[in-house]
Each structure stands twice: as C-alpha cells, then as structure tokens.
C-alpha cells in the first residue's frame, strides 16, 4: 500500500526519493504490486501544487502530474469501502419514534 507521499517522493527530488524510486522500479519489474486508495491521485496533485506554491518546485511540476496515471499502481476505490459504513445512504435508515436504530 502506498500513499501520496511515496508518489510525490518518486516524482520529484525530495528526501526519500531513492527508496521511493527503488519501490516503483520493483513494481514496474513485477517484483512487487503497489496498491493505493484512489484518492492517491488528487492527493498527489495537491501536494505537488503546494510544493510549487511554496517555491520548492517550479512550474514544470505541472508536467509531472501527467505521470500520475501511468505509475504502476493499482488504485482501490474508496467509494466501495464506504457502502459498508452504517451512515451511508445504502445502509442507514432514519429511525422512527417507535423503532430503535439497528
């Protein structure tokens, strides 16, 4: 399981770029399988945008965002997990005064 921090470390030169690069190269070679929540894409883009805003990256980071969708990551949908949560519309029902919540 990887998150946006690992993706950003791989895409730009930061403190942990070397281990992130090894991990993504292993995934490209088929030695490991990388999974991430589907939110990894907007979270990574947001982190890159923040680095540009802070002056840590120049505007060429916009080109880096294009690489997000071709990384060797299997994205797991977060919407599928939320349907089992008791407060989602699929499973939640409003209790009536005579019926206690289940």
Image (cartoon, rainbow, N blue to C red):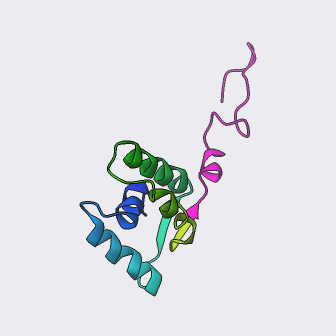
What residue is rendered at 57% in x and 56% in y? 38
| 91 with respect to 50 (left or right) | right
Residue lying farthest to the left in this orientation: 15
Stretch in magenta: 75-102
Q: Residue furthest front?
A: 59
Q: Residue at x 42, y 62 (%)?
A: 7
Q: Is residue 54 above or below residue 93?
A: below
Furthest toward the top, the residue is: 97
Work out whether 14 lies above or below 23: above
**Percent coordinates x, y for residue 69 in the rendering:** 57, 66
Asked if residue 36 lies in the magenta stretch, the reply is: no
The image quadrant where one finds the C terminus is top right
Name the residue at 71% across, 38% down: 91
Question: Residue 92 versus residue 57: which sits nearer the camera?
Answer: 57
In the depicted structure, whether residue 55 falls above or below residue 74: above
Q: Residue 17 at x, y = what percent? A: 29, 67
Rendering quarter of residue 8: bottom left
Residue at 40% across, 48% down? 52
The x and y percentages for residue 28 are 46, 82
């Amino acid at each position: 399981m990887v998150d946006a921090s690992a993706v950003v470390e791989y895409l730009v030169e930061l403190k942990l770029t070397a281990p992130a690069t090894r991990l993504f190269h292993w995934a490209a070679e088929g030695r490991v399988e990388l999974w991430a929540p589907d939110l990894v894409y907007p979270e990574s883009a947001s982190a890159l945008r923040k680095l540009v805003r802070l002056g840590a990256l120049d505007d060429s980071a916009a080109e880096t965002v294009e690489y997000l969708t071709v990384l060797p990551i299997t994205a797991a949908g977060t919407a599928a997990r939320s349907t089992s949560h008791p407060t989602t519309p699929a499973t939640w029902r409003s209790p009536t005064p005579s019926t206690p919540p289940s």
